[in-house]
Image (tube, grey):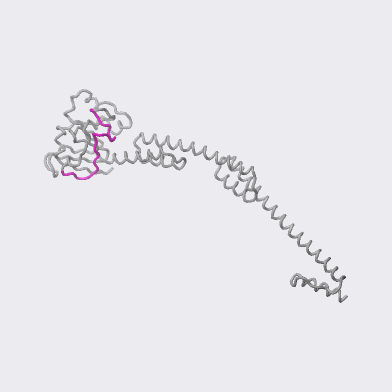
Amino acid sequence: MKHTLLLFILFGFSSAFGQIVLGNSGAQQVFGAVSSVGREVVRAAEYKKTKEEQEQREAEYNNNVSQADAFFTRGQYREAIDMYNKALTFRQDQYVRDQLARCNAELARVDREEYQLFIDKADSLYAQLNFSAAIESYTEALTKKEVQYPKDKIKEAKADQERWGKVHFSGLLISDKREDDLASKAFSKDPYSDFIKPGKYNIIDDFLTYSNYQTLDGIAVPANMHLVIYSEPQFKGQILVDVVGPAIINNMNKKNTPNTKEIQTREFTAPLQSKFPQSVRTWSVSDMKSWVKGSMEITITLK
């Protein structure tokens, strides 16, 4: 009895002290049998734990796939991608990888459609001279598709927006379309036009480059801008023009030239008709060629 008890005590300390040499073969047999049972118990516990972990991972995988499939069905492809990727952390599976490819293809299709919607909207706004809104829509389009077209249009819209914040001077008459040797299109850049920002100009001629090359023949003043032109430098002499835009003033010397009369009376193409209706188009009170020797003030008025 005492011998058997000693064997069990020795078995209890065996894990701490490594191998214990027993005095006889019977004791060794008993110890071996007990050790074998212990190892089986440990292995059974480890197997149970591993199986539970596998079942948990499988449950997590199935739950993620189920949620991802639901998102995919509803067209919520970004959310579906997140859930499919989570599923792959639990198990690598061909179905999930195929679904990810489908999600990315659908997102690309949606982005193409949304890109075109933004472009169509931006182009329409640009045509209406609504530059700020057009720039915003072109910028939105870029979030869907990184291409050159909206970048170029943003640059153009900003340039146009800047021009419309100035007074347009031209060596030709100013109209709604560009016509060789006859007219500049209002607020469009050409070799006969200058765009002058608000400020005071002691001698007009010093600040013009193209419109005074031969003769000044047209001035367009945008809405909410005030233009005063004096006949002499340093804001002296007769006031030749005192107008708040919108206004177009064309040189009286061109009044009776063929094809010029109707510029003041015809229906402009949209949207310039709404910007410069016939009621704001006039002929100058004197030959505009001499105006460049005077001075002028350009100010922004309150809306």
Q: How many marks?
A: 0
The correct choice, above or below, for 80 with respect to 282 in the image is: below
Which residue is more in the foreground, 211 or 11?
Answer: 11
Kindly identify the residue that appears in the image at 80 percent across and 71 percent down: 11
Which residue is more in the foreground, 120 or 16?
Answer: 16
Residue 239 in percent (x, y) is at 14, 39
Kindly identify the residue that appears in the image at 25 percent across and 34 percent down: 191
The correct choice, above or below, for 3 with respect to 207 in the image is: below
For the C terminus, the quadrant is: top left
The correct choice, above or below, for 239 with respect to 45 in the image is: above
Region in magenta:
181-202
Residue 115 in percent (x, y) is at 46, 38
For the N terminus, the quadrant is: bottom right
Left/right placement of residue 201 relative to residue 28 reads left
Write down the quadrant of residue 36 in the picture.
bottom right
Left/right placement of residue 117 relative to residue 106 reads left
Residue 184 in percent (x, y) is at 26, 31
Kindly identify the residue that appears in the image at 75 percent across and 60 percent down: 45
Write down the quadrant of residue 211 in the picture.
top left
Residue furthest toward the bottom?
2
The correct choice, above or below, for 82 with respect to 114 in the image is: below
Residue 106 in percent (x, y) is at 55, 38
Left/right placement of residue 261 relative to residue 126 reads left
